[in-house]
Amino acid sequence: MASRELEVVHSPQVETPPSRGPLSAFLDRLIGPFHRGAAPERKPAMGFYTDTTVCIGCKACEVACKQWNQLPADGFAWTGNSYDNTGELSATSWRHVKFVEQFADHQPPEPTGNGRVSLHDQPHDVRWLMMSDVCKHCVAAPCQQACPTGAIIHNEFANVYIQPDICNGCGYCVAACPFGVITRSTLSGHAHKCTLCYDRQKDGLVPACAKACPTASIQFGPIDELRERARRRVEELHRRGVPGARMYGSAPTETYTELHSFYLLVDRPEVYGLPEAPFNPWLHMLGDYFRTAIAGAVTLAVPLAAFLLWGA
């Protein structure tokens, strides 16, 4: 992959268009905005498989994501929540490493006289759960369904992609996402989230976060291959005595479609800050339309009946 990246870097990135006359250039500027470009050729669906059992919380994915996408810093606030100072996904943080500390009786160990916690006094059931969170790239994305301008699309890799130049900053996608992924930028007012390194994929490169992950916790590739790899990993963990190992988002449910960024967890989804049963708000739309129609009919019928009965 390193040689491939060097090859891409040294290859020409922009093709110079042939020179044209002033009349042709004028017509292009006049008519060009009304032309639709050719749709890109469909590619195999690509995505992420995150194995939380091998995540070490190094935050290399966060750094690589910010560096490649040139995202601004979020400040240097100390949250006091373990080693998690990122806090949450945002318009400027497209990767977020979560730290979940689990202690016996839900109480952290008491410090010694020098203010330090002795490792020898730790109860046996203490553990840290770590997960690198990101946009789920849903197959049927509520954010896309709620977008009124068509700014949110599925690109040729079946990834959910926001076109910031078309986004009007309405925030409907923010309310529609059941995972709390999308937020609006305080600078531009537009919605932003993980692009799954669309620019790198077009050049045949691995997304920055997956390339930087030192333990292969974040794995990238065709979705079908990732699901099979994840299934074998769950079976292996069960053989090793980890009965709580389970997949999250790899298969559709009654209320939500499968995710193109799914996870291997060893505890309940709520422990990781994920909804146990995500629900697509679009499923309520038929009932909402019906109730709205009834309310409108009643609103018109009441004054009309009053006019007919007492107006004469």
Image (cartoon, grey):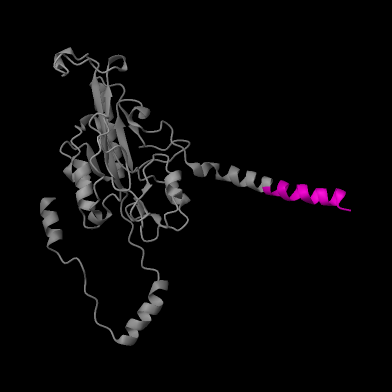
The residue that appears at 19% across and 15% down in the rendered structure is 122
Instruction: From the viewer's side, name the closer residue of 102 and 10.
Output: 102
Instruction: Let me know if residue 59 is in the magenta part.
Output: no
Regarding residue 141, the answer to whether it shows in the image is: no
Instruction: From the viewer's side, name the closer residue of 25 and 80.
Output: 80
Q: Position of residue 159 (x, y in %)?
A: 34, 50
Q: Quadrant of residue 56?
A: top left
In the rendered structure, the answer to whether residue 2 lies left or right of residue 187 reads: left
Regarding residue 145, the answer to whether it shows in the image is: yes
* Residue 307 drawn above or below residue 228: below
The residue that appears at 86% across and 52% down in the rendered structure is 311
Q: Position of residue 23 (x, y in %)?
A: 34, 87
Q: Position of residue 26 (x, y in %)?
A: 35, 83
Q: Which residues are magenta?
A: 296-312
Q: Quadrant of residue 15?
A: bottom left
The residue that appears at 37% across and 33% down in the rendered structure is 274
Instruction: Let me know if residue 308 is in the magenta part.
Output: yes
Instruction: From the viewer's side, name the closer residue of 303 and 166.
Output: 303
The chief SS type of the magenta part is: helix
* Residue 233 drawn above or below residue 285: above
Q: How many marks?
A: 0
Instruction: From the viewer's side, name the closer residue of 203 and 146.
Output: 146
Q: Position of residue 103 (x, y in %)?
A: 27, 18
